[in-house]
Image (cartoon, coloured by chain):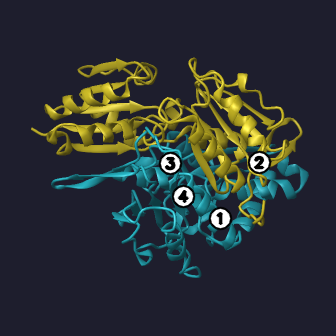
Chain colours: A cyan, B yellow
Amino acid sequence: MSGQLAVVGLGPGDARYLTPEAQDALSSAQALYGYAAYLARVPARAGQSRHASDNRAEEARAAAALGDAARGARVAIVSGGDPGVFAMAAAVCAAVETGPESWRALDLTIVPGVTAMLAVAARVGAPLGHDFCALSLSDNLKPWPLIERRLDAAASAGFVIALYNPVARARPWQLGSALERLRRHLPLSTPVVFGRAVGRPDEGVSVTTLAAADPTQADMATLVIVGSRETRVIERAGRAPLVYTPRVAAEVSA
Amino acid sequence: MSGQLAVVGLGPGDARYLTPEAQDALSSAQALYGYAAYLARVPARAGQSRHASDNRAEEARAAAALGDAARGARVAIVSGGDPGVFAMAAAVCAAVETGPESWRALDLTIVPGVTAMLAVAARVGAPLGHDFCALSLSDNLKPWPLIERRLDAAASAGFVIALYNPVARARPWQLGSALERLRRHLPLSTPVVFGRAVGRPDEGVSVTTLAAADPTQADMATLVIVGSRETRVIERAGRAPLVYTPRVAAEVSA
């Protein structure tokens, strides 16, 4: 009897973004683990146990799911977006590294999904059309000065920047501080995109500028994209503007 | 009569990665445009015209598809992976910006997909589990010194780096040069992942180190991930090693 663990990316929310591979992994699992809000997106299935946990309980969730799989079960952990981007796949790997030897013997599969920055980018055009980076603004797991250093490096080298975890109840000031930091490097006219809950009924996407970007417009479900010097906005009569970063970049000094 | 254009991400290759939204866009299109190798992944459908073009013909392809949509057709352009990441969405936006006013009036939809770095990362664990960047090594559209500057910035600030377009027939030296550049910043033991054609029959994934990474192992279908100082490898008896970047980062100076 050999257990299996799949770490499954649900995509941005709507079932239209769920890949067939992810659907299969969910259907064949005997036990589902996940943050309650993600688990709620998966329809209940007879004979399948469900183990919802709090958002911040990643380590305990990973250990519980691995233990269940090690006892022979087919287990899936669900993750919003892509499980490899600021999500459960790294937590599971960390648990495998420090856990019992039997966890290394498990059949472990990571099922990729559409991560938030791709979904938000798609809604407005192609802001990630050229070199870009993804950076979590949560300083729960890393010191704020390191985040500032990465913001400096990314903006000054011309990367478009996708900001994950921009705010949380316990972290109200980080996004404002990050935007202020980026204003040192980038023109105030630089396009900024706020995308929240893309693919869900309460979706909201807006395009603004680095000058006007209001950090209070973001919540835990928001992904923020800050353009580079090359990022452009195309106005369209009667339609939302398009935001894109050209594939051609000429700038070297900046 | 109002035309529609969807720019559709097929994901890494296999139909298991094709989202229902992408499937719907392909099914409802009257005309399909794309690089021949991507178009070949889409089953033929009666009554649907197909317009294959060369890999490098992005601008002409975008213009042809927009023109077709502007005449009232439901058109889809297919893209490998995600259309917003070094792919057709930016080319379409650029064409809209410079093209006739009627193109701005079109119903334009970008359909996101699983981009190569997510698929490759999933195969080996969670190397993109912390802050990371995506950088194209093609110097067709930007000067090589700008690429070097971005490699320096990303590596020294601790981003994991996903390298798209590492080599091409006309660009044989860029990956070797990039790896050499990264050796200035990162330990020679830094994990490096080569992933080619993930999700296709000729898939090949290997894990090596920055010291041993051999640029001749990459081709046009390869995505390379270079870890940060934090990226770790977990050996597993009888299984491929896991590669992951912990969610926790302590380092500030480096």
- Do the residues marked 3 and 4 share a common chain? yes
Please state which of residues B44 and B31 is positioned toward the viewer in this rendering.
Answer: B31
Q: In this image, B161 relative to A9: left or right? A: right
Q: Report, in whole angstroms, how far the alpha carbon at label 4 lies from the one at label 1.
A: 10 Å
Does A168 appear above or below A30?
A: below
- Do the residues marked 4 and 2 share a common chain? no
How packed mark 2 is, by other alpha carbons closer than 10 Å (few <14, some 14-19, many 20 or more), is some
Residue located beneath label 3 in the image:
A114
Residue B215, image x, y percentages: 72, 26
Q: Amino acid at mark 2?
A: His
Does B212 appear above or below A184?
A: above
Which numbered disc, 4 or 1, marks the residue that appears first in the sequence? Answer: 1
Q: Amino acid at mark 1?
A: Arg
**Residue B54 visible to the viewer:** yes
Q: Report, in whole angstroms, how far the alpha carbon at label 2 lies from the one at label 3.
A: 31 Å
Check disc 1 and report its element: helix, strand or loop. Answer: helix
